């Protein structure tokens, strides 16, 4: 929408992961080095953790793009609270193996036969498990058992586990000792610092074809870092709105005041509207059913503290608790929206993978 105004060739702050915009922060470079090492081993588990929107998927896609896809068979699983056997069925379905209604023993034999067949064709099998923090202990154990499959001293399956920070705590439980011994590499992706936030923004603009526009007031960068906590996806969301504001106002130089205005707009959009059940065109207040208790006071919105037998201090404390609950609700709502975006991103990735398979199949014929 605003790309032409700024002279950009593409949208610089899109929310969906794109390896072409990969930014190598200190933590991302360190994580990539560990992942490269794990991939070279072609064995065991690789664990990637990070906050929602920290760049896990972008890093992972960049790594996968560096592999020879003609020699790698990839299965993608997005976990929910499934039991161990259902998790195995999800693994089978991810690799296109027919496992419906098969007993567990047959399921394991079918999977092993599939992995052996791929290895004999000179291919390796890679399983990617997203939302790994949702895995139960029994499900993790089943995945560990799959890593026992070998053919001529060669591991048949390597697994990437991608999850939120709480997955690290799950792995530290005593019952996870055997699993931890199978982990070839692990990395955690934290937020960007203030300097990296500025370089991240400039990097994405350059990747999008910027030749000098837009420009930012120096004080805008610390404000963007503080508001986003250094999480790349939050930076993208804020900067996308910031560029849209500049476009609507016909300005290519963006200031701290612009950042504050966008933050106010986002905060207002997250608020829960009052009296949402009443049409704004209807000035008549809704009548309560007769079975409802009468109001404590005839004046709307008034409260008789004496009747409640509460002190002013207690009322103030209750008011503070309600405000805190409201803030928690807003935070939860934002997190749900972010998770929804992640699910949409995974669907897009799976769709692209299927389309690529179709294209490869057409080329072979």
Image: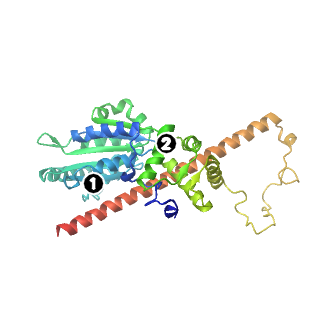
Provide the residue designation for mark 2: 197
Give coordinates of residue 239: x percent, y percent: 53, 51
Mark nearer the viewer, 2 or 1: 2
Report x, y in % for residue 181.
28, 32
Give the quarter of the figure containing the C terminus. Answer: bottom left
Residue 224 in sight from this viewpoint: yes
Q: Could you give the CA–CA distance between mark 2 and mark 1, rounded to whole angstroms? A: 41 Å
Q: Where does residue 200 sit, x and y in percent of width and height?
A: 46, 45
Residue tagged by mark 1? 92
Q: Residue at x 26, y 59 (%)?
A: 96
Q: What residue sits 43% from the left and 48% below the top?
A: 203
Numbered disc 2: secondary structure: helix
Regarding residue 108, the answer to whether it shows in the image is no
Who comes first in sequence, dot 2 or dot 1?
Answer: 1
User: Could you tell me which residue is drawn at 22 percent across and 52 percent down?
Assistant: 68
The colouring scheme, among rainbow, by chain, secondary structure or one colour, is: rainbow
């Amino acid at each position: 929408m605003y790309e032409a105004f700024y002279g950009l060739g593409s949208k610089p702050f899109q929310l969906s992961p794109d390896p072409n915009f990969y930014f190598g922060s200190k933590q991302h470079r360190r994580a990539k080095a560990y992942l490269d090492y794990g991939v070279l081993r072609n064995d065991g588990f690789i664990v990637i953790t990070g906050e929602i929107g920290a760049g896990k998927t972008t890093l992972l896609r960049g790594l996968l793009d560096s592999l020879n896809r003609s020699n790698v068979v990839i299965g993608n699983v997005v976990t929910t609270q499934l039991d161990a056997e259902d998790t195995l069925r999800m693994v089978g379905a991810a690799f296109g193996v027919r496992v419906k209604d098969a007993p567990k023993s047959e399921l394991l034999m079918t999977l092993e036969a599939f992995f052996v067949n791929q290895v004999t064709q000179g291919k390796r099998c890679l399983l990617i498990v997203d939302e790994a923090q949702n895995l139960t202990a029994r499900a993790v154990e089943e995945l560990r058992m799959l890593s026992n499959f070998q053919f001529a001293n060669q591991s048949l399956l390597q697994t990437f586990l991608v999850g939120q920070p709480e997955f690290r705590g799950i792995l530290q439980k005593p019952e996870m000792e055997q699993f931890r011994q199978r982990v070839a590499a692990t990395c955690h992706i934290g937020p960007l610092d203030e300097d990296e936030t500025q370089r991240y923004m400039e990097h994405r603009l350059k990747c999008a074809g910027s030749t000098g526009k837009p420009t930012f007031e120096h004080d805008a960068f610390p404000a963007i870092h503080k508001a986003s906590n250094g999480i790349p996806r939050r930076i993208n969301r804020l900067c996308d709105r910031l560029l849209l504001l500049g476009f609507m106002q016909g300005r290519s130089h963006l200031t701290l005041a612009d950042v504050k205005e966008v933050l106010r707009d986002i905060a207002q959009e997250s608020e829960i509207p009052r009296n949402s059940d009443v049409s704004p065109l209807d000035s008549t207040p809704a009548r309560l059913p007769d079975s409802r208790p009468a109001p404590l006071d005839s004046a709307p919105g008034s409260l008789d503290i004496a009747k409640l037998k509460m002190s002013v201090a207690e009322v103030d404390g209750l008011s503070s608790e309600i405000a805190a609950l409201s803030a928690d609700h807003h935070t939860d709502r934002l997190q749900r929206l972010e998770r929804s975006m992640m699910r949409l991103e995974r669907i897009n990735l799976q769709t692209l993978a299927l389309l690529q398979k179709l294209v490869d199949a057409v080329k072979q014929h």
